[in-house]
Image (cartoon, rainbow, N blue to C red):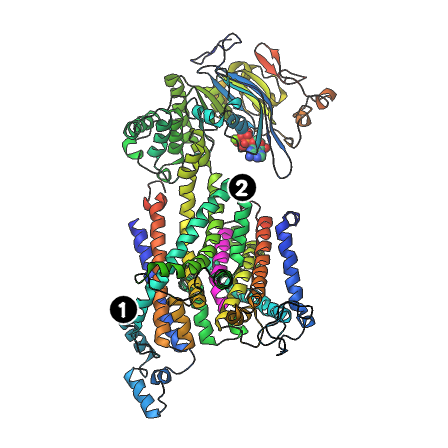
Amino acid sequence: MGSYLVRRVGTSALVLLLASIVVFVGVRALPGDAALALAGEERDPAALAEIREKYGLNDPIVVQYLRYLGNSLQGDLGFSTRTGLDVSQIIVDRLPVTLELALLSLLVGLLIGIPAGIVAALRRGSWPDNVSNGFGLLGLSIPNFWLGLVLILVVSVQLRLLPASGYVPLLENPVQNLQRMVLPAIVLGTGLSAVLMRQMRSAMLETMSADYVRTARSKGLSERQVVLVHALRNSLITVVTVLGLQLGALISGAVITEQIFVIPGFGKLIVDGVFTRDYPVIQGVALVTVFGYVLVNLLVDLTYSFLNPRIRVSGAAS
Amino acid sequence: MRRFLRRRLSVFGLAVLVLIVALALFAPVFGDPGANDFAAVLQPPSAQHPLGTDDLGRDTLARIAHGARVSMQAGVLATLLAMAVGVPLGLIAGYYRGWADLVISRTTDLLLAFPFLILAVGLAAILGPSLRNVVIALGISALPSFIRVTRGEVLGLREQDYVAGAIADGARDVRILRRYILPNAISPLLVQATVTIPEAIIGESVLSFLGLGVQPPTPSWGTMLSAAQSFLSQAPLLAVFPGVAIALAALSFNLVGDGLRDTLDPKATR
Amino acid sequence: MTSSLDLPVQVGPANDPLLSVDDLRVRFASEDGPVYAVNGVSFELGASEVLAIVGESGCGKSVTAMAIPGLLPPTATVEGSIRLAGVDLLSLSPKELREVRGKDISFVFQEPMTSLNPAFTVGRQIREVLQRHEGLSKRAAQQRAVELLELVRIPAPQRRVDEYPHQLSGGMRQRVMIAMGVACGPKVLIADEPTTALDVTIQAGVLDIMRDLRTELSTAIILITHDLGVVADLADRVVVMYAGMPVEEAEIHELFAHPQHPYTNGLLRAIPHREKGVEEVARSRLAEIPGLVPSLRSEPDLCPFAPRCPRSTEICVSLRPPLEPTRPHHPTACYHPGEDS
Ligand SMILES: Nc1ncnc2c1ncn2[C@@H]1O[C@H](COP(=O)(O)OP(=O)(O)OP(=O)(O)O)[C@@H](O)[C@H]1O
Ligand SMILES: [Mg+2]
């Protein structure tokens, strides 16, 4: 367990370091002159040269990178070239919005996906299985931004049940906040639940035909105990491993969902940043996103190894 | 093949797929997607415009048909690109292992550290918006899966007696890879491709929707939806047809993919 | 008949047998049509008797065994009757059947590596059956689990009880399975090739345990195997199966001395120096007899062994031979019974 933990954390740290290089180089590769962007309306060559000097843009790229890394580690992500605001502060403001959306979606995804997958596997070939499979295929095939549009169209424009867009902070007015978060969470959550359902179903089918499930039956355990104690545990272990990767899909989905529902979260921040060529913002958001994503995957892996005794307890015989 | 045909849904998927490909191939038959008619903007479906018109009076059916070209190109080309780069890298990593494997695998981890849309948005921003660059961005995003699938297959096949035997006999690496390993890795790669294509089709529509992909006036399902967003109350159907098109295209590939998986690997419990 | 084994068991029609299986038929529904896996198996098992079922791979041994406690998948259709102390198990409700499983009839499976749940400690898995049927508290069950591990001679049972299956070797896992099997003092223990998947050196240890258990616990055992050495070691009586049917049944020394069915003859001939007796046979295995095993796609209406049989005549390929005594207490399903000359 100990050595596994160290190795796993080491890999994540390496990936993060490499990712920071990629982000740094990537942002330098964006079209347009950084000095020009920093200068705003200023077009005077002398002023531009001064800006270059001031921001160290003439230094070797490695020096620039190290400075950027050092600053980032201290939480200094620079200032937005468009609004002049502290990027770290913007991120701190926007992060809870996206986190709320992600958590609500995860909730929707798990609440639908896991039970549907279990039922589909246990009642293989029955109508619940067929419905779940159809739902799973549609969920994979329907782009979530279109689902968002359709929901806005039906629920907000036609039926006028819920507001189509906008955001009210949770602490300010929880009811209005939820009213505005329900549709985005459904949009993001159903896509996720489709994937989870398919994975849960196949994991469950596999464990239900495992020898140890037959052993459990041979002990006279009830079908309930066989499923909930013996099969479910091992199926969940499998599904947890892929949950981390699903989080990438969730982040991607959040980017576009926030765009459609005009939610001032992380995803909207980066897309707006791209359009306004706000490099420090893009850089900061990309870095924080990757950091969070890698971190969560690390946590998922550690949870997995905790759930799975094969890794938790390295045995004498293995 | 019989196994595949026995699955009615997969056959349905194949039929839809053929239909969409035909739509793309014969797109010009459905008219000029750029011809605007300001006397007939935001029209509901009619005999003249079976799917209605958009805010510039352009025929929706013609635009959907031309959009099919963009979607199919993006889906297939991005997948081919990912295969063309990913398969050789996977072969090298799995066959030679050691340093090559370490470098390639860490690069894969690195690519995977970027959520798909963050990567694609970043790449699209760096490369500039165009169909070609969308294909490149989607291709790079799909790279890790192909590297991983190929590498995993090679690692497994290397252990097989006939491959080990060929290696022991001193056969040349290229020959071993071409004759023994690649043919056996085809099935899983094919299945991976049928998963990647619909993802890329959706990816293209997302990027175009955000304005980072295909640029107007070129019709793409994503840009059509983006434009339709402003007319949700006046012309709701504008936001419906392109979405149905994307969903059907992705669904057809997913159905065919499920059928292929069943056919190629009957043991797998789907 | 004199027996050198310790436990000569008298099973006759006078005693009500502990377990009686009568005309058992099992059919599986599959994508390519039905599979007739078991076609009319009958046998009786007396209290604390050891009955061996032998036959080559795929002849339906495991399916027969699993049909008894109702462990076959839902694709299986089971017909005939299976009576445990007079109660027809096939007519029990699923709930009633669950009372029998693990308590009256327990099972040791063929695959020691995969039959234990990797997510739980072996102690927990043994406890489960005790808590289910004996109503023991967790504490008492844990104590009992340690004792059971000791009974199957697992060293350091106090420590092992809290270990996970992956920390145990194959032989130890199979002992855990046996411990689980005997936990509630079952009337019948079904052991499906308990040693086949194990190394030869480990096999002996597991067999020793089985032999001791039958004396200590007086549990009746159905022992499934294709290892004739195991049969000679442990069994009182043997049923030879071929293509889902019993072809011969006899007390062990009778069978080794006077095999009647040509298939049994073939099996025994394949073993060198048979005349030297049971001990010699002990380390040999059922050898492959040339010829094809018949497909199980249709219900057999002729002698299934006929295509491979040197004694085959016209009647063999037109009518299925009945299982009838050709010697005292020794039924054989063959028109041309007798020992090979
Ligand atoms: N679930 C099932 N569905 C269809 N056919 C099955 C199923 N289980 C077993 N069979 C078939 O029934 C026949 C008997 O199988 P069984 O497992 O009883 O053989 P066995 O005598 O135990 O062989 P082995 O020595 O290899 O364990 C085989 O032909 C097998 O293919
Ligand atoms: Mg068997």
Residue A73's mark?
1
Magenta range is B137-158
Classify residue C262 as left or right of residue C120: right
Vertical relation: A53 (above or below) A153: below
Q: Report whether residue C122 is seen.
A: yes
Which residue reaches farthest left? A74
Kind of residue indicated by mark 1? Leu
Magenta highlight: main SS: helix
Residue C24's mark?
none
Mark 1: give few (<14), some (14-19) or many (20+) Cα within 10 Å. Answer: few
Task: Please tell me in which quadrant of the rendered image residue C317 appears.
Answer: top right
Residue A124's mark?
2
SS assignment at label 1: helix
Q: Chain of mark 2?
A: A
Q: Report whether residue C284 is seen.
A: no
Residue B23: give x, y in percent of width and height: 66, 66
Residue B155 belongs to magenta span: yes
Q: Identify which residue is drawn at 34% across, 50% down.
A: A303
Kind of residue indicated by mark 2? Arg
